[in-house]
Image (spheres, rainbow, N blue to C red):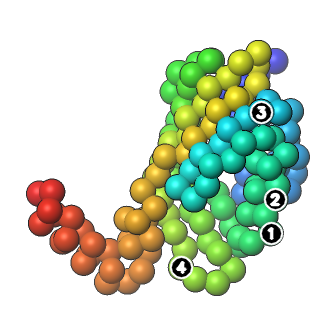
C-alpha cells in the first residue's frame, strides 16, 4: 500500500483532472482535527478544510500542480510544487510553493501551504511584475 506522502503526491498530481473527486479522496487522509494554513486562511477541522476545497473547485476554472517533488517522510514531510490557478475571471496566477505536512497515526494533522502571494499576483499582471522586481531589488538588492 502506498505511504501517506505518496498518496498525497498522487492527489496533487491529479487534482486538476479529478477536481471534486480529488476533494472526496482527501477525506480519509486527514485527521478530524487537522489544521490548514495558507496565505488566505487558518482553518481547523477536516470538514471545514474539505468545504474550503469544494468552494475552490467551484470558483476556479483550473488549479493544477506541476514540478512536484516529495521531500522527507512521516511524520514530517513536504511536497514542493508550482501551482497554476486560473479563476473564471481575472489573471492566471503561477506560483511556486511547498506544502508542509505533519502526520500522526497515518493521518495529516497539520497542512501548511507556503507561497509568495504578492510576487505571484504581481508577476501575472503585465508590467506590474517588472515594477515589483525593481522595487524589491532596490530594497533588498
Identify which residue, 11 or 74, lies in the foreground: 74
User: Do residues under tags 4 and 1 come within 8 Å of each other at their CB atoms?
Assistant: no
- Dot 1 corresponds to which residue? 58
SS state under label 3 = strand
Q: Which residue is mark 3?
A: 33
Name the mark on residue 123. Answer: none
Q: Is residue 36 visible?
A: yes
Q: Is residue 103 left or right of residue 135?
A: right
Give residue 70's position: percent from left, percent from top: 55, 31
In the rendered structure, are the residues bearing label 4 and label 3 in contact, judged by CB atoms less than 8 Å apart?
no
Mark 1 and mark 3 in contact? Answer it, CB < 8 Å: no
Q: x%, y% of residue 34?
A: 73, 35
The disc placed on residue 54 is 2
Are discs 1 and 2 less than 8 Å apart at CB? yes
Q: Residue at x 51, y 27 (%)?
A: 71
Badge 2: how crowded within 10 Å, few (<14), some, or many (20+)?
some
Nearer the observer: mark 2 or 3; the answer is 3
Disc 2 on helix, strand or loop?
Answer: helix
Question: Mark 2 and mark 4 in contact (Cβ < 8 Å)?
Answer: no
- Crowdedness near tag 1: few (<14), some (14–19) or many (≥20) residues, C-alpha within 10 Å: few
Question: Looking at the image, is 3 positioned above or below residue 70?
Answer: above
Q: Residues within 10 Å of mark 4 (few under 14, many from 20)?
A: some
Residue position for label 4: 91
Position above or below: 22 against 72: below
At x 69%, y 80%, the residue is 88
Which of marks 3 and 4 precedes in the sequence?
3
Amino acid at each position: 500500500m502506498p505511504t501517506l506522502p505518496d498518496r498525497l503526491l498522487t492527489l496533487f498530481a491529479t487534482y486538476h483532472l479529478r477536481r471534486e473527486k480529488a476533494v472526496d479522496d482527501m477525506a480519509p487522509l486527514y485527521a478530524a482535527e487537522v489544521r490548514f494554513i495558507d496565505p488566505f486562511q487558518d482553518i481547523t477541522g477536516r470538514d471545514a478544510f474539505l468545504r474550503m476545497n469544494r468552494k475552490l473547485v467551484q470558483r476556479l476554472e483550473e488549479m493544477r500542480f506541476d514540478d512536484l517533488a516529495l521531500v522527507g517522510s512521516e511524520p514530517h514531510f513536504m511536497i514542493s510544487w508550482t501551482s497554476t490557478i486560473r479563476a473564471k475571471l481575472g489573471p492566471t496566477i503561477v506560483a511556486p510553493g511547498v506544502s508542509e505536512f505533519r502526520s500522526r497515526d497515518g493521518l495529516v494533522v497539520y497542512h501548511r501551504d507556503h507561497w509568495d502571494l504578492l510576487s505571484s499576483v504581481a508577476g501575472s499582471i503585465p508590467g506590474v511584475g517588472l515594477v515589483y522586481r525593481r522595487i524589491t531589488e532596490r530594497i533588498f538588492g
